Image: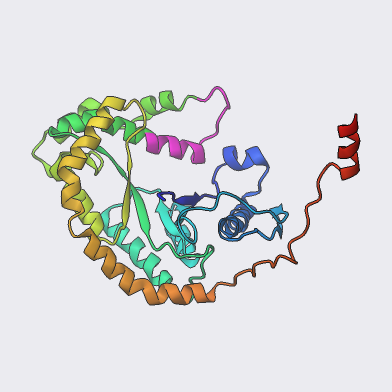
């Protein structure tokens, strides 16, 4: 009962070109398939579908999910335009961008204005009104140690993503890590020197990397900006497994109790506020009728009965 279902249409020639998919058709293709997957998870049997890029005959797709009508559905987003698309389709927005609280608030207002408007017509059979963003994550009682453990890996993650979008690649020969090391603007030692300074302008490491107090402040600012969930990026670059586990334990002990205080009340207020808008959005969705038993097409056995009997006699 803890499954979330996310969709992403792809963005690069490495992805799309590998499957021969034109960039101009990728969103329509992903939405066509995602809507049918939602139907597969909720309909018994799934009545089948013949579309532009996806087709499947009538089958009873199993197992059905424990969450009803289906797990929360999310869409990967990289900018304001795709956040609008997610809201228009009643999908949670997985914003894989690193933004400050001011920008996060602008994104949240755009997203929830659409969720509450007539433009919201759910792709699935429920509305997942949630906005999540990505944050760096490295936590230690000593801020400089947190930076030493996590900053380089976080920078590499961003560099690698940008490389896939903006750089030519030579499959099997491109070396993104080496390129990152050559082009990195500020090395770890210089980053540590700046972080030890009393000058706020030198506080140059990524938000989400620091002491428990730094994390509490960072997450509190995002929460106040209207962000619902934060995805911590930690397993990247040369980050050590032991350091990640230690950071997670420290987060659970010292940060989580602070940032989750009052969560039940906040979520209850949000649910009550959005309930009439979600009900109206679901009423706008056009649903496919379930097949009666008489309408379900017979799937003929691949081996005829006479052939089975003949084989048995032999």
- For residue 153, above or below residue 266: above
Q: What stretch is highlighted in magenta?
A: 157-174
Tell me, yes or no, whether the highlighted magenta stretch contains residue 10. Answer: no
- For residue 30, above or below residue 235: below
Q: Please state the horizontal and vertical placement of residue 33, each as a whole percent of the image.
A: 62, 54
Give whichever of 154, 138 is nearer the camera: 138
Count the numbered circles shown.
0
Q: Please state the horizontal and vertical placement of residue 13, each as a whole percent of the image.
A: 59, 40
Tell me, yes or no, whether the highlighted magenta stretch contains residue 164. Answer: yes
Residue 287 visible to an observer of this rendering: yes
Quadrant of the frame with the C terminus? top right
Residue, x 27% and y 70% (percent of image)? 269
Residue, x 54% and y 63% (percent of image)? 123
Residue 240 visible to an observer of this rendering: no
Give whichever of 101, 40 is nearer the camera: 40
Residue, x 22% and y 65% (percent of image)? 265
Give whichever of 107, 66 is nearer the camera: 66
To which quarter of the image does residue 150 belong?
Answer: top left
């Amino acid at each position: 009962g803890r499954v979330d279902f996310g969709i992403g249409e792809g963005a690069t020639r490495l992805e799309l070109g590998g499957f021969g998919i034109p960039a101009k058709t990728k969103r329509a293709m992903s939405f066509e398939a995602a809507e049918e997957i939602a139907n597969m998870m909720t309909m018994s049997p799934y009545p089948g579908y013949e579309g532009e890029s996806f087709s499947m005959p009538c089958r009873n797709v199993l197992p059905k999910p424990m969450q009803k009508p289906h797990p929360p559905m999310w869409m990967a987003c990289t900018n304001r335009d795709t956040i609008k698309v997610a809201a228009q389709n009643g999908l949670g927005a997985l914003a894989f961008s690193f933004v400050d609280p001011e920008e996060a608030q602008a994104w949240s207002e755009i997203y929830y204005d659409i969720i509450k408007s007539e433009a919201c017509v759910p792709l699935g059979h429920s509305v997942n009104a949630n906005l999540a963003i990505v944050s760096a994550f490295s936590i230690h009682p000593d801020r400089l140690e947190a930076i030493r453990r996590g900053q380089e890996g976080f920078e590499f993650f961003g560099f690698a993503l940008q490389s896939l979008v903006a750089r030519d690649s030579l499959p099997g020969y491109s070396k993104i890590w080496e390129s990152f090391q050559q082009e990195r603007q500020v090395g770890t030692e210089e980053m540590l020197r700046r972080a030890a300074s009393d000058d706020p302008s030198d506080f140059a490491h990524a938000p989400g990397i620091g002491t428990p107090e730094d994390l509490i402040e960072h997450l509190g600012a995002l929460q106040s900006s209207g962000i619902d969930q934060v995805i911590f990026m930690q397993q990247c670059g040369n980050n050590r497994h032991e350091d990640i586990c230690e950071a997670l334990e420290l987060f659970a002990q010292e940060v989580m109790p602070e940032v989750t205080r009052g969560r039940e009340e906040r979520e209850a207020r949000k649910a009550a506020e959005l309930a009439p808008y979600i009900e109206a959005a679901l009423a706008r969705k056009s649903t496919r009728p379930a097949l009666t038993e008489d309408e379900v097409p017979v799937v003929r056995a691949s081996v005829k009965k006479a052939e089975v009997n003949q084989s048995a006699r032999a």
